[in-house]
Amino acid sequence: MLLTGWLWCLAGGVLAGTLAGILGIGGGLIIVPLLIYLLPILGVDPQLVVQMAVATSLATIVMTTLSSARSHLRHGQVSFFWVRRLIPGLMVGAVCGAWLATQLKPEWLQRIFAIVLMALSIRMLIPQRSGEPLTDVSKRLMGIISAGMGTLSALVGIGGGSLTVPLLQRLHVPIRQAIAVSSVGSLSIGLSAAIAFIVLGQQLENNSGLFGYVHFEAWLAISISSVLFAPIGASLAQKIPVKHLQRFFAAFLVI
């Protein structure tokens, strides 16, 4: 990979890692567009660019959210009640989403990504109700919802934080706990989907420098910087007032 490509990936990793720590997202909303731009320059088949951007983004999310999740654990913000409710469905859905992404045409994936981003932006601008956390949601319903979120997240290459945080807020989970749980959820989505993309892409031709659909050099460059900056973002999340966190999250999605 050319030096320019490395620099772009490193810069993307810095931004993705910082936002992962602050907002509990995996960074895919930044990484996917960046890779869609960079991969053709790196000689990737145009028909595979979107799938590889999605797969590589999810693989970087593993490293980014592993770092941020550890930081949130140290701060004692991870609610294991919600982790147990969300993770199984997220992982199953992520595998389904990865398979579906390999079956759709690139144009459809790009359209779905744009629609998801627009919908999330609008949703986060709607004021949330205050109140005590609700814990009486049935496991079956939560399993269905989390599986759907995992599928959609893997389909467009995001860690799911931009879906998980609004869901948990809807259930009256405090914003800092929601962000911390989202980091763990994003890790589970990224890991499950990345493994699925690697397995599904074993039959690709001219796969030098690739792990299935994952572009190794781009993954490495983004992961290096994102891992370094995710703990910084997690520390910032503990200091920023709750209202500012909510506004920042909504503004990020709109941008």
Image: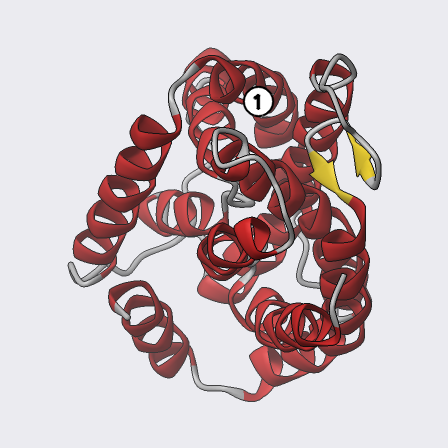
**Residue at image location 57% in from the left, 22% down from the top:** 98
| Crowdedness near tag 1: few (<14), some (14–19) or many (≥20) residues, C-alpha within 10 Å | many
Task: Give the x, y percent position of residue 141.
Answer: 41, 16
Task: Give the x, y percent position of residue 221.
Answer: 77, 64
Q: Secondary structure at mark 1?
A: helix
Q: Quadrant of residue 80?
A: top right
For badge 1, the amino acid type reads: Ala
**Residue at image location 51% in from the left, 66% down from the top:** 23
Position of 35 relative to 86 (above/below): below
Task: Give the x, y percent position of residue 205.
Answer: 73, 20
Q: Quadrant of residue 207?
A: top right
In what quadrant of the picture does the C terminus appear?
Answer: bottom left
The residue that label 1 is drawn on is: 98
In what quadrant of the picture does the N terminus appear?
Answer: bottom right
Side of 81 where 129 appears, left or right: left
**Residue at image location 45% in from the left, 63% down from the top:** 175
Position of 40 relative to 255 (above/below): above
**Residue at image location 64% in from the left, 42% down from the top:** 58
Task: Give the x, y percent position of residue 107.
Answer: 31, 31
Count how many numbered circles sit on residues in the image.
Answer: 1
Q: Quadrant of residue 3?
A: bottom right
Position of 17 relative to 49 (above/below): below
